[in-house]
Amino acid sequence: MALASCGADEPKIAGAAPTMRRLTEEQFRNSIADAFGADIKLGVKLEPLLRTGGLVALGAQHASVTPFGVEKLHQLAKSVASQVVDPQHRRTLVACGPTDPSAFDEACASQFFVRVGRSLYRRPLTEAELKARIESAAAATATLGDFYRGLGSSLTAMLMGPKFLYLIETTEPDPERPGSVRLDAYAKASRLSFFMWNAAPDNALLDAAARGDLDASSGLARQVDRMLASVRLEDGLRGFFADAFGFDQFETLEKDAIIYPVFNLQVAEDAAEQLLLTLNDVLIVRGEDYRNIFTTRHSFISAALARVYRVEAPNPTGWAPYEFPAGDPRVGIQSQVAFTALHSHPGKSSPTLRGKAVRELLLCQKIPEPPADVDFSKFNDPQSPLKTARLRLAMHTEQAACAGCHKLTDPIGLGLEKFDGVGQLRITEQGEPIDPSGDLDGAKFADAADFAKALSTNPASTSCVVNRLFGYGVGRVPSRQDQPVLDYLQQVFASDGYRYRALLQRVATSKAFFAVTSEAAGVAAQLAPSEAKGAP
Amino acid sequence: MHLWGPAAAFVSAVVCSVTGSAADRGRTLGFAVTNWDTAIYESRFEDECPEGLTPSNEENWLRGLSQADRARFTSKGSGGYGNRPTRRGANGENVCHFPTSAVDPPLLEAEGKLSYGINLDGTQDGKATAKSCAHEKFQGVDGTPAVDNQMYRLLGCTYGWRHYGIVDINADGQRKANGLGLILIEVRNVDDLQNDDDVEVAFYRSIDRVAVDGSASPLPYGTYRIDTVNGVPRYGSVVKGKIVKGELITQPANVNLPFYGNYTFIEQRFRDLSLHLEIDPSGEHAKGTIAGYYDVEQLWDYIRGLSLTSTHQYSCPAVFTALKKLADGYPDASGQCTHISSAFLVKAVNGFIQHPTESKISEASRGKTSSNGGRVSAEN
């Protein structure tokens, strides 16, 4: 990809210790699909990760596995392994076979684990690792009397092991900085691939790592350009934004069926998909300015969502592009059902939750949790003469303990008040006209469309995506020492016209993206040397 | 373009809320009929059915058995006699296919004075005219004099059609579940949603089903594609109408309507059909009456097809005989009326009716907008 030079040089930063992160649910699924095909069914979910620094992916650094989690993982691994070696799949996934199916075939097992191991461990197996897998399969074959079940047993152990389940970044001495370390080529490949595709490295990237291409800027640039041109870039975009915009909350999203009969599981699924389709369309397909995600009228719609938006479904059996007309208050992703429904109460809208979500998810600003002793009785009083949320929320300004935070959230969320608790358009609340005017950091707006402009021109909207994306890529919450490079990336993002694809390229080819320190020698050093790489 | 592919292309009718403004001029409303129930007026049972409910095939068969046979066939409950209640013609014929092969006690007709429906023959006394046979009139439930509804007289005292019966409940449920036979009503050229003396109403069949909420209630704002054959709507009767105080009333016209229910498809051929439809203020729901002369042969085909379900509780020979007797519309050369006056209570939800034409999807992708954008409704 050719990018205009912005003239500024990337500041040098020390980086941080290499990380060890558990694969997210999506990364796990993508890895299985890449290794064995998309038809391998995964019926069980991994244990949820704790959101950290605004991203679930960063919570993966702190993931532990509970006993129950081990049971689930075993179930999952066993199910995957069983499918891989079943009669339906073994011809393509095992590719070789013993003369006697009840006897162990070392050559075939070796061939299988060499290929599969490279995909699952995201690097070639060491001799010791390969030997361990073969011995495990041989022992299981002897016990079970079936070669394929023996392979499956050994594969199950592999899928449950930390070398697959965790992204363990390993280092090597840096020849350009004697006494320092750098990520080794395979760790770079994984960091790059999970960043751009939300998946493990493909063969081409692993081959490039094996050749040492990723240690040279030209080789790295070739791979980055290849990955940017791939259709899998959409997977990466989906992984990042679903995480950054808190889509894990959809799993527990519920609405009062009496108040919002139109809302159901299909609407929730489609709402999330609509937002991701919109982002992909604006940022990758059309290659527009990132800020346009807050002002776009272009989207996609399904039949279930069309009922919520109360518009015709252009394609009643699937998805279709949809343009909200001029004058319609649906402007930008923040007006879509995914945002308005997710950041509402089960039975009503919430300017406070929406304002908080805008601050935290779209502008990367932290809003403190409410004090424990808040009295909501007046606000929730169904007999209250205060018919609209605006009137009720005004009560907060009278209480000093509440006013501080509510001043940060409510004037924003009120701009979306014409969307009810599931995102349906309305003009009144309890018979009173809704006033959707508000204020975002001093920018007054009259309605949702006006708010969209204020949001798109707020400097924090672009710095937010830069910071989040960088943290997502390097697998840790950016620290103060990263600020110079974040400022630099923000600067080049602007000079690139706020193009998302260009930002990905800038981050992925930056020195900072792979910068690691030798202190603590990373997670690999925390493991015993034999565990880190050489041992099975 | 292949019509049924995922990118099937349609241009839509529009739904809108009943707010009445200049913006309403020339608008099109779309509705999907979610409930289609035979209009059986029920108030005081002793007035409507003083002799009780019509005996069923099963009951007539049991009554005709000797005491020994009755004991023999019922020793295992009702499961022991299979289809004998219907195969009781003189030579073992199925009395629902050969209704004259057995003679049952006469059907018990509804004897109440009130009924749903409209005056179809134009008379006040029900005397025979060129297009009708002599019959008794009802007073309309709403006080309208000289209402015709011989179908109510026919079925009003039959278990399956009364409120505890399941003929219509089953049919409504099946249409809801599988979307078959869903009637679409498109109201065109609406200038004023309260009073408009010239609107056009078209009837279609949908290929999409009605979406429902968690309690199986129909959801408004669905999108429905019209069922077509070679690009032409399979149904598509168009009639003139008017809106009076918010109620849509169509002029009598011959209209074909789809029907599916109780595992039976019918092309309902109505004569002199009128639609009376009240649209609620939100524009999302509507209810009303469809009245007209119903083809006797079609009704008989439907009813006899239900005979295997003993819970409907009617006698085929009795219904057949009564149907010929009560038919009151459009006599043939012999003087036997071929149609029966009828009324159906309907409920509908609003929706977008898509006509088969140029690609809506490609229009949207080019940035054109839905003709219904920007509409809002108030939250309760």
Image: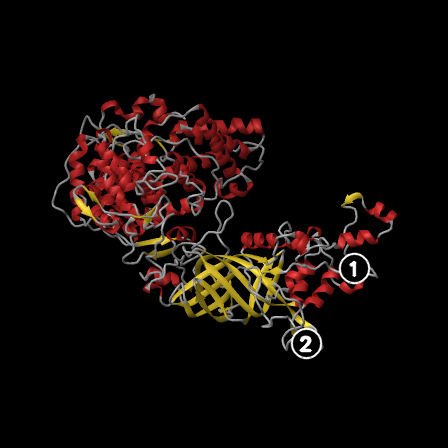
- B266 is higher (above) or lower (below) than A96: below
The quarter holding residue B200 reads bottom left
Numbered disc 2: what chain? Answer: B
Quadrant containing the N terminus of chain B in the rendered view: bottom left
Nearest to N terminus: mark 1 or mark 2: 1
Q: Residue at x 66, y 57 (%)?
A: B156
Mark 1, residues whose alpha carbon is within 10 Å: few (<14), some, or many (≥20)?
Answer: many
Q: Residue furthest top?
A: A528
Amino acid at circle 2: Asp
Residue drawn at x 60%, y 72% as measured from the top left? B121
Query: Can you identify the residue that label 2 sits on?
Result: B332
Q: Residue at x 27, y 42 (%)?
A: A390
- Is B1 on the left or on the right of A189, as rendered? right
Where in the figure is residue B207, as x and y percent of width and height?
51, 60
Q: Is residue A309 visible?
A: yes
Q: Position of residue A303 (x, y in %)?
A: 43, 53
The mark found on residue B104 in the picture is: 1
Q: Is B242 on the left-hand or right-hand side of B73?
A: left
Front residue of A372/B324: it is: B324
Q: Secondary structure at mark 2?
A: loop
In the image, what residue type sits under mark 1? Asp
Question: Does residue A14 sit above or below A34 in this rendering?
Answer: above
User: Could you say which is closer to the camera, residue A479 or residue A206?
Assistant: A479
